[in-house]
Image (cartoon, grey):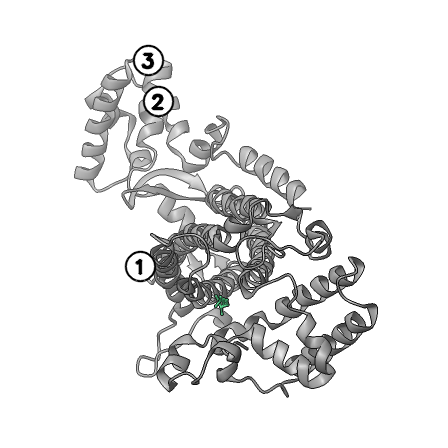
């Protein structure tokens, strides 16, 4: 492509370090879409004849069908997807192919292709998150009033509802969704026509190509347009946070599906067996989802590090952007799909959840609140009295509701029998009616709100 200035071809090692076709072939569709928009615009502007534009259009469609059909021969000597496509176009349509690169450069071309690819991934991720949220909503609605222990420090804290716990994840994944939606809006400016870095002397119409490719507008500064990889970094940043959320949820599923907890049963479809221990059903999908943050965060750090300190405008360093983003996007999509499938298929073991909900003195706070409300005790004193009652129950080897009124009176003489009403887990969760609280009624309000929002 640049033989005019060169007397010798590249060293084999030069070719190996320089070529990106091994991975950027994934941008073939975007590259051809971009070239078609560019050629149509050049023709509309009178820069290309209609005859050449038509030949290019037809030729590009042929190249695309060859690539999609698997008959295209990619060449490392041709370095990247842009030159592979252009060289093949030349075979097919001859001289007209050489006119396609008028008023553009591989610098704006690659920025455009990659943006189109990342934008598609953002849309796919948004859909994947929506599907996961819907699976969680179904779980939340079915078990809006099922009780389970809520934890802090992974120690039993207060009873909550299964629906409430599921809805906590809906909120987390909703924030992820909005991060991708937000990034998508910001990235949707078209670099095509920025050319190498300075724009072009041809009378191109960047608004037309931007519109043809579904962008909101052309990017306003040609230097920035070819230097910018923020869109990829924002994708990775949002993906990293999402992968962290997936990891936390996966960890809960691993714990909950263990023989010690038995809060949930994961379906056979999302579990594996052991080759030696016949009794085992392992939560491999959850474990792998828990681990995906590693490579996704790695990609985020890698690309930030590549971009750090790069002078304007394009530098070849930036070719190192794609593999990281491809890998992160593939693995995020897989993790989201696996999590959605697991959530849809899993069974919450209602009886085990309820039994656990009442253990560990989980309604101690309800008791303290009762002392404040009914006996008008300052909360700090109520905390102390409740602590003494917990200690008493612990010594007797029973739970709080199993203490007798006489037991209670040995700690505080004013306690009355209606205290037992607040010691049951169902009453406990039903009383948490504050906005955002765990009461089944409040959970169902949130379920309806999200169902409407996603409909
Ligand atoms: N393969 C290159 C990349 O991925 C395309 C842009 C090359 N531009 C250049 N001036 N060498 O970044």
- Residue carrying label 2: 369
Residues at discs 2 and 3 in contact (Cβ within 8 Å) = no
Residue 272 in the image: above or below residue 363: below
Tell me the SS state at disc 2. Answer: helix
- Residue carrying label 3: 375
Labels 2, 3: front one: 2
Packing grade of label 2 (10 A; few <14, some 14-19, many >=20) is many
Which badge, 2 or 3, comes first in the chain's sequence? 2
Residue 455 in the image: above or below residue 268: above
225 vs 271, nearest the viewer:
225
Packing grade of label 3 (10 A; few <14, some 14-19, many >=20) is few
- Residue 3 on image: x %, y %: 51, 80
Q: Which quadrant of the view contains residue 298?
A: bottom left
Residue 22 in view, yes or no: yes
- Residue 206 on image: x %, y %: 68, 52
Residues at discs 3 and 1 in contact (Cβ within 8 Å) = no
* Disc 3 to disc 1, C-alpha distance: 39 Å
- Residue 153 on image: x %, y %: 27, 43
345 vs 290, nearest the viewer:
290
Labels 3, 1: front one: 1
Residue 56 in the image: above or below residue 413: below
Q: In this view, does 229 lie to the left or right of 119?
A: left
């Amino acid at each position: 492509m640049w033989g005019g200035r060169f007397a010798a071809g590249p060293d084999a090692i030069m070719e190996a370090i320089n070529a990106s076709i091994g991975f950027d072939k994934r941008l073939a569709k975007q590259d051809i879409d971009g070239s078609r928009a560019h050629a149509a615009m050049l023709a509309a502007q009178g820069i290309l004849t209609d005859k050449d534009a038509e030949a290019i259009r037809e030729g590009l469609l042929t190249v695309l069908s060859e690539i999609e059909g698997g008959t295209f021969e990619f060449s490392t000597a041709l370095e990247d997807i842009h030159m592979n496509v252009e060289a093949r176009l030349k075979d097919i349509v001859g001289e007209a192919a050489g006119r396609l690169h008028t008023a553009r450069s591989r610098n704006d071309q690659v920025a455009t292709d990659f943006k189109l690819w990342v934008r598609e991934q953002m849309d796919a991720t948004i859909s994947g998150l929506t599907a996961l949220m819907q699976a969680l909503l179904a779980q939340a609605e079915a078990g809006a009033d099922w009780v389970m222990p809520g934890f802090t420090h992974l120690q039993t804290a207060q009873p909550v509802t299964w629906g409430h716990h599921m809805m906590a994840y809906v909120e987390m994944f909703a924030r992820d969704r909005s991060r991708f939606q937000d990034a998508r809006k910001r990235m949707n400016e078209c670099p095509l026509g920025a050319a190498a870095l300075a724009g072009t002397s041809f009378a191109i119409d960047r608004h037309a190509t931007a519109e043809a490719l579904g962008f909101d507008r052309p990017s306003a500064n040609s230097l920035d347009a070819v230097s910018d990889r923020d869109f990829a970094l924002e994708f990775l940043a949002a993906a990293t946070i999402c992968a962290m959320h997936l990891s936390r949820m996966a960890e809960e599923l691993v714990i909950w599906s263990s023989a010690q907890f038995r809060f949930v049963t994961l379906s056979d479809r999302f579990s594996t067996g052991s080759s030696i221990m016949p009794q085992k059903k392992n939560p491999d999908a959850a474990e792998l989802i828990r681990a995906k943050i590693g490579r996704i965060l790695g990609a985020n750090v890698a690309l930030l590090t590549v971009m750090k300190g790069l002078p304007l405008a394009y530098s070849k360093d930036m070719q190192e952007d794609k593999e990281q983003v491809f890998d992160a996007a593939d693995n995020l999509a897989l993790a989201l799909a696996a999590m959605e499938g697991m959530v849809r298929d899993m069974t919450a073991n209602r009886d085990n959840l309820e039994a656990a909900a009442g253990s560990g003195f989980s309604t101690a706070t309800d008791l303290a609140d009762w002392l404040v409300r009914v006996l008008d005790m300052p909360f700090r004193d109520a905390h102390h009295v409740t602590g003494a009652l917990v200690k008493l129950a612990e010594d007797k080897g029973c739970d709080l509701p199993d203490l007798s009124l006489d037991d209670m009176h040995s700690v505080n003489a004013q306690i009355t029998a209606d205290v037992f009403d607040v010691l049951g887990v169902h009453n406990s969760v039903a009383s948490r009616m504050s906005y955002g609280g765990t009461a089944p009624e409040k959970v169902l309000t949130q379920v309806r709100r999200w169902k409407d929002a996603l409909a």
